[in-house]
Amino acid sequence: MSSAYDSLDPRVRKWVYKQGWSALRPLQESAIPAVLARDRDVLISASTAAGKTEAFFLPACSAIAGITNGFGIVYISPLKALINDQYRRLESLGEALDMPVTPWHGDVPQSIKKKIRPNPSGILLITPESLESLLINSPGWLKQAFSPVAYIVIDEFHAFIGSERGMQLLSLLNRIDHVLGRHANPVPRVALSATLGELDKVPELLRPDKRLSCETVTDNNSSSTLQVQVKGYLEPVTKKGEEPQRSAEEQVCADIFRLCRGDSHLVFANSRKRTESIAATLSDMCEENVVPNEFFPHHGSLSRELRETLEARLQQGNLPTTAICTMTLELGIDIGKVQSVIQVTPPHSVSSLRQRMGRSGRRDSPSVLRMLISEQELTATSSIVDHLRLQLVQSMAMIRLMISKRWFEPADTRQMHYSTLLHQILAITAQWGGVRADQLWTQLCQTGPFRNIDVNDFKSLLKYMGAKSLLTQLASGEMVIGAEGEKLTNHYTFYAVFNTPEEFRIVTGNRTLGTVPVDSPLLPDQHIIFGGRRWKVTQIEVEKKVIYVEATKGGQPPQFSGGGMSVHDVVRQEMLAIYKENDYRIAIGSKRVDYADATARSLFAEGCNNFKRYNLQNSHFISDGQRSYVLPWMGDKVVNTITALLMRSSFKASSFAGVIEIEHASLSSVQHALKEMQLSGLPSASELAANVPEKYLDKYDDYLPESLLTKGYGAKAYDIEGTQIWLQNNML
């Protein structure tokens, strides 16, 4: 072994030997001196299953082996399942060092928590929500139990970045340093992550006040092989009097059945509904073929028991098992390695794709990723989205960015996170019993993560919280929790800052079509696809949670389902590059590698021909007589902004898959309006957001003053600067 290995505690070395490892991986070797130093933050970035957990825990356990008067390591995870998993993995290492490993989250029995309370030591595995509960309800015990902490390690760090939960976590870490009186010598933070865009900016996301330097350890020696295939499917249109042909979904399910039976796989679909329908179809196919069922759904709405049974079955690996899942199995729960990963429709982001792909590839065998993409058969009424085969080309762009450019989405640092700021004001006030406004400002905004907030907005938030009885100011100037604040902070749901998306009913006339979770902005006149048809939103009743729609004549609804979370500018620009090159292949050395099957190739050729036919290599604007279209080839934020600007100028505009559709308007009137906007200067994001009826996206948005709600929504939904640049470049 090496000098790095020799610096580990003898008992740790003995444990490594017992695992039968002939050598540590290069990533693990590189991490040992960085972690043992204990004077810096460390970022360990490598693909799923590259040994990140051991890269941290082997040196960290060596460093804390002598600590017995409190926890030496606090491990924070985004998922309870990941904690349970790490507990299983670390148990034998803990035993070798006589070091307790304690899981701590909402599902852990009280008996386990009680047992560790008198003499805390070793490793604590905890969620941000349980950490919040400890800070509010047991700050004295936490101060004692955490006093010797040498490391706070955050697993799957990318899952926190840029989210409300990530802001809560950074605030929690700040508050722990405060409780421990360690602002001068803060506790080192270690982040473990597989997919991080713009690595050089991550240290600042891990510690916004930059009090410690950060060392990055990456897995440059990874020589894993990747096999990628994009399979295309055509959704047939059945004409009257014809026999219905096999739908694209049936073809997709038949291929999953053929490719996956007899081994273990993960199939990712982007929605719970789709997950359930694919799993049900495959289970029926097993029954028809008189073979045991190997296909099971896995998503957040399933009971814990069902999810854990499936995870255990994958882990044991003795029965062939395919999980049809949403993003629930994207993070690092140890389910063993599966033979392949299948993605049905494009995922939300390139980093998500990379994360998913990392779940496949057993020892000495390549990672296998298949993307199954359906497109609609073209008819006289087909939409431009279908003509261009946008879904297929988005998938190809994502694959190119992931493999050729090794690009992943960077964090969106422009958001305001007012909902979580309000939550943290209440949490700190509850923790300390009373607090002054300047102390809150210092801890949350000056030295904490809410650096985008200016002092006037902070003051207006506190005033509003006072007016709504969330806070009360005493004669001494101190603030305490008010009567309404008590109701919130005393409820068990308070510790979590994330919201489960609220279900809105979709109603046309007096008929309910079904429900959809609303986690992204909706506007009147916007087009949505539901139940395979195109609808236009006519009205939104926020109180009643109802969206009223009417059927629209947009020809067939586009067959696009690669949206969801915001698609980044870089993805759309890569799509444009692929169309212009008329080539999606990946350059490896002097070769160009093809990864599409015959159907995908023919659909791609069709998309490129239509791209040329519409003259889109030279123009962003086209018209079909009834409608005008703008194709900015920019991310959803810029597309949302242009759409909102046009609606502000009284156009009937809606966007779908990055294409803006304007009804009953000539191209020249659209272009003229955009030119005028560019010359006269664009409104602010807040001004655009003022017209949006449903701005409540985050958990505590209901308690925000209208001005901050609007400002926060604007920062989340729009990109004025990016739009300004686009207009300058394209409205000559």
Image (cartoon, helix red, strand yellow):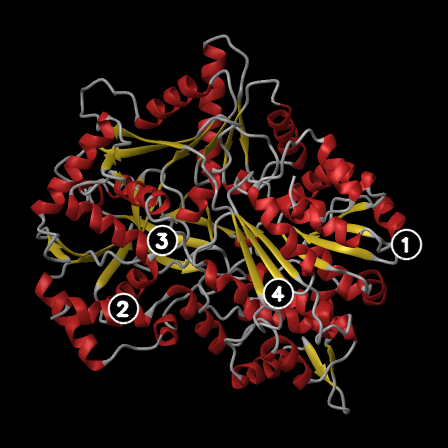
304 or 526: nearer the viewer: 304
**Helix, strand or loop at disc 4?**
helix
Residue 567 circle label: 3
- The CA span between labels 2 and 3 is 15 Å
Tell me the kind of residue under disc 1: Asn
Residue 170 circle label: 4
**Helix, strand or loop at disc 2?**
helix
**Helix, strand or loop at disc 3?**
loop
Name the residue at the right extreme: 118
> Which dot, 2 or 1, sits closer to the camera?
1
Please state if 229 lies on the left or on the right of 193 as rendered. Answer: left
Tell me the kind of residue under disc 3: Val
Query: In what quadrant of the picture does the N terminus appear?
Result: top right
Residue 478 in the image: above or below residue 381: below
- Tell me whether circle 2 and circle 1 mark residues in contact (CB < 8 Å): no
Of the residues under marks 4 and 3, which one precedes in the sequence?
4
> Which dot, 3 or 1, sits closer to the camera?
1
- The CA span between labels 4 and 3 is 25 Å
Q: Residue at x 44, y 36 (%)?
A: 269
- Counting from the top left corner in percent of width and height, residue 167 is at 58, 64
- Counting from the top left corner in percent of width and height, residue 160 is at 55, 56
Is residue 157 something that shows in the picture? Answer: yes
- The CA span between labels 2 and 4 is 31 Å
- Counting from the top left corner in percent of width and height, residue 185 is at 71, 72
Tell me the kind of residue under disc 4: Leu
Of the residues under marks 2 and 1, which one precedes in the sequence?
1
Residue wearing tag 1:
119
Residue wearing tag 2:
723
